[in-house]
Amino acid sequence: MRRLRLPLLLVAVLAVRTALAYVPAPGAIFRHLLTGRDEQRISTARVEGTLVLAGGASSEAGSQGEIQSDARVLLKLPGRCRLEANGPETGKLAVVQAGGQLKNEGPAVAALGVGLGELCALFGARSAGDGRAELEAHLKKRGVNVGSSWLARFGGHVAFVVGGPKDGDAQFWVFKDSWLPARIRWTEGGTRWDVRFVDYNSPAGDWFPRAVEVSRDGERQVRFTTLSGDPRANVPDRLF
């Protein structure tokens, strides 16, 4: 019996390691993400919070240093999203995405447009109809290899990563335990973008992150911090 213990122990350890290392194919990851969105039954939502602009984003908004203002994100799914801010330093500015088109009201801040674009694509998708095809098309547009997936850690949590394994590769990260978006990063026109969705233990509920951060060439330029949210808010069409 003693002679059998070591081989049995090794088999058990290998079995556990195999289970922990299991990585679903990208298609399965997308399916879980999209069906989870459907189960939340969110069609319109409003999220109140604060917006901090720094670096190039602050300059584009007309300031010389870091600025902060009240802000809110409005969602009308699928595919219509709006971020608006109003403060002494920013004045009134808004970024709107509808029908795949992005427009600005007030100063054009590139990092705000990038952040809203990813929110709209990743939080506004549905599993029904062409939802998965649209998600994959969006990721391919960012240069993500949608045929490859692997495991990594993000913010102390395990995540599935779709895309290449190199640090400079375009990648889409999804939290393993919740199937919620964690991060997307890519390079476009020589500019490195990194959009992070930080912590779903949020005042809005677990359907929206506590913070959304946008970095450009390694510098964080935008941080939206959630203060409250209403997943059943009335969002007028005229805002889009």
Image: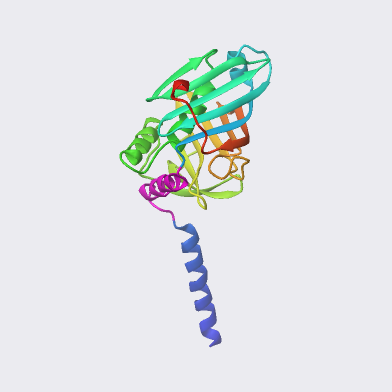
Quarter location, residue 136: top left
* Residue 169 in which image quadrant: top left
Q: In this view, does 19 lie above or below 181?
A: below
Q: In which quarter of the image is the C terminus?
A: top left
Task: Report whether 201 appears left or right of 30.
Answer: right
Give the dominant element type of the magenta stretch: helix, strand or loop. Answer: helix
Name the residue rendered at 52%, 53% in the picture. 177
x and y, in percent, of residue 213 in the image: 58, 32
Residue displayed at 61% across by 14% down:
59
Where's residue 147, x and y in %? 35, 44
* Furthest-left residue in this view: 129
- Residue at 37% x, 30% y is 141
Q: Quadrant of residue 87?
A: top right
Say whether residue 192 is visible. Answer: no
Q: Which of 133 and 8 is in front in this view?
A: 133
Q: Which colour scheme is used?
A: rainbow
Residue 10, image x and y in percent? 51, 73
Task: Please say whether residue 33 is one of the residues in the magenta stretch.
Answer: yes
Given residues 200 and 169, the one toward you in this image is: 200
Query: What range is drawn magenta here?
Result: 23-41
